[in-house]
Image (cartoon, rainbow, N blue to C red):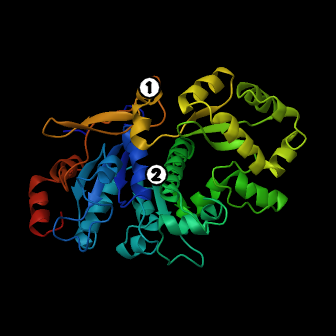
Amino acid sequence: MPFDKASDALSRFTVLDLTRVRAGPTCVRQLGDWGANVIKIEMPEGLETGEALGGAREGSDFQNLHRNKRSLTLNLKDPKGVAIFKRLVEKADVIVENYRPDVKDRLGIGYADVEKINPRIVYASISGFGQDGPYVKRPGFDQIAQGMGGLMSITGAPGEGPMRVGIPVADLCGGLFAAMGILTALLEREVSGKGQWIKTSLLQAQIFMLDFQASRWLMEKQVAKQAGNNHPTSIPTGAFKTKDGYINIATAGGKIYERFCHAIEAPDLITHPDYAGRELRSKNRDALNAEIDKRLAGRTSAEWIERLNAEGVPCGPIYAIDEMFADPQVKHLKMAQSVKRKDGSSFELVGQPFTMSRTPSSLKVAPPAVGEQTDEILGEFGFSDNEVAEFRKANIV
């Protein structure tokens, strides 16, 4: 049977998914959630050595990364398995891989190999540091990229040493940028008729995500430092203590600062000689923050959030993850979405962060069992039942 589409948006594209762990699966998830025919290629059971990368298959992490896919087992270490893969390439649109850079060429499935079979193929490679250069042979990992990409030097409180971000931001952004590259290449293919090779890395993604902190160095030669919960340039912005907890407040610009001061019944902070102007507020930020905490101590977080929002001052609660999913706006945005297991039961995963008016995305199917659709997929690509039986006998699928 044909694949169960999660959306009509990308349903005309077939994706061969060679990825594992996180950055690669993040990329492919974007394509699968928007309807691409994703074929997850895995080693036949019993041939994979060592602990599975990416965690337990039934665990929340794997389930969230690998929905909206079908699974084909294929031994790419066997020349016959590579031959099967190359027959799939003939009809495919996209290949995504995150092997170490030399592995795909050693297997005979690198871009130069598959382009000869299908010049329209869009081939995406995600690595730790790039496909060439002095670090090409180094293994890549999210936390290594966070450190080398400058992020850990600006995260955390001053004087407490480098701090990683609480999510694998280099992995996630590397995957999202690869997906963006694939979509860009597919659009360009409509003009040229040719595919191309997209290359990105965790290091490139992390550096790009430094954004204004990177440009501060490139243009102004300012090296950003750790600022804790304080915003490095917009002051006062940060986490402030209330009667029963903490809230975030952002007062970018003089007008918002004035509205904020009136809202907390502290108009004197507008004209105070230490805080009259952005540069003075930056210079004296610790004293200003202490003044703000003093004024906020008399009301609860909920009271201040209501009052500040009414005055047009950006603010919000600081949630634990369970509290975040209980928020009425998060519920309205449907960020937790239900997906059905094969036994009819259901569970929730994280939905896509954008919507489309005519071709919505859905969590259509839960992640497949290893090789669950092997026979089905090979049949769609023209392999006979007898061929598939021989492949199984030889442990190729």
Marks 1/2: CA distance? 46 Å
Which one is closest to the eye, mark 1 or mark 2? Answer: 1
Q: Is residue 52 left or right of residue 134?
A: left
Instruction: State which quarter of the image contains the C terminus.
Output: bottom left
Q: Earlier in the sequence, mark 1 or mark 2?
A: 2
Q: Which mark is residue 120?
A: 2
Q: Quadrant of the N terminus?
A: top left
Judging by the rendered image, the residue that carries numbered circle 1 is 328
> What's the amino acid at mark 2?
Arg
Question: Which residue is pictured at 60% across the width and 67% down the height?
Answer: 162
Whether residue 177 appears in this view of the structure is yes
Mark yes or no: residue 5 visible.
Answer: no
Q: From what the image shows, is residue 171 above or below residue 357?
A: below
Identify residue type, mark 1: Pro
Q: Secondary structure at mark 1?
A: helix
Instruction: Between residue 87 and residue 256, name the one nearer to us.
Output: 256
Report the residue at 17% width, 51% height from top: 372
- Mark 1 packing: few (<14 Cα in 10 Å), some, or many (20+)? few
